[in-house]
Image (spheres, helix red, strand yellow):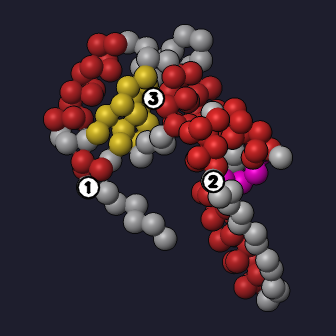
């Protein structure tokens, strides 16, 4: 199991708030304590940021225009266990499912098989041909 405790400087926090003054104040407080802080002014930007580089912690404003905090949470929850493009379990979802299945197999004294697939060279495809082409490769 991965070590969930990190040093302060290694902890990446995403702050989502539509009020710039709130973002600046929270960021200043957290950065003064040594945290790495990223900021988003709306839910759409936050979701894109999480897709690119998932943070360790998200501080999320509830009252925002366009997409409120509850809607952002709902969208971030799919991202947490399943790949948005294929609908298949991602790494986190895979290990959660594998752990559940292992417990079930032990309890029922049955055997099971789980498959984890990885695509070699996907980063190179994304870097040279673009993420859209990488998405096509994944779907195929």
Spot occupied by residue 120 in the image (x, y as percentages of width and height) = 65, 58
Specify which label sits upstream in the sequence, 1 or 2.
Answer: 1
Answer above or below: position of 95 versus 121: below
Quarter-of-image position of residue 137: top right
Residue for badge 2: 121
- Compared with 44, 57 (above or below) is below
Q: Main secondary structure of the magenta part?
A: loop
Q: Is residue 91 left or right of residue 85?
A: left
Q: CA distance from mark 2 to mark 3?
A: 35 Å
For the point 29% across and 39% down, which residue is it?
Answer: 36
Q: Which mark is residue 60?
A: 3
Q: CA distance from mark 1 to mark 2?
A: 32 Å
Give the tally of numbered discs. Answer: 3
Q: Position of residue 9 (x, y in %)?
A: 24, 48
Span shown in magenta: 85-90
Label 2: which secondary element: loop
Residue 87 painted magenta: yes
Q: Along the polypeptide, which appears first: circle 2 or circle 3? A: 3
Q: Position of residue 4 (x, y in %)?
A: 40, 61
- Looking at the image, residue 76 sits to the left or right of residue 60; the answer is right
Q: Which labelled disc corresponds to residue 7?
A: 1
Mark 2: give few (<14), some (14-19) or many (20+) Cα within 10 Å.
few
Image disc number at residue 124: none
Q: Residue at x 62, y 26 (%)?
A: 71
> Label 3: how many residues lie within 10 Å, few (<14), some (14-19) or many (20+)?
many
């Amino acid at each position: 199991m991965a070590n969930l405790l990190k040093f302060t400087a290694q902890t990446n926090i995403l702050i989502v708030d539509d009020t710039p003054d709130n973002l600046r104040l929270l960021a200043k407080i957290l950065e003064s304590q040594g945290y790495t802080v990223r900021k988003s002014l709306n839910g759409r930007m936050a979701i894109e940021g999480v897709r690119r580089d998932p943070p360790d912690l998200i501080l999320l404003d509830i009252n925002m225009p366009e997409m409120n905090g509850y809607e952002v949470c709902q969208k971030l929850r799919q991202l947490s266990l399943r790949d948005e493009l294929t609908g298949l379990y991602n790494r986190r979802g895979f290990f959660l499912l594998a752990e559940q299945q292992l417990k079930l197999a032990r309890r029922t004294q049955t055997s099971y098989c789980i498959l984890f697939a990885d695509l070699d060279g996907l980063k190179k495809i994304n870097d040279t041909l673009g993420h859209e082409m990488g998405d096509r490769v994944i779907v195929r």
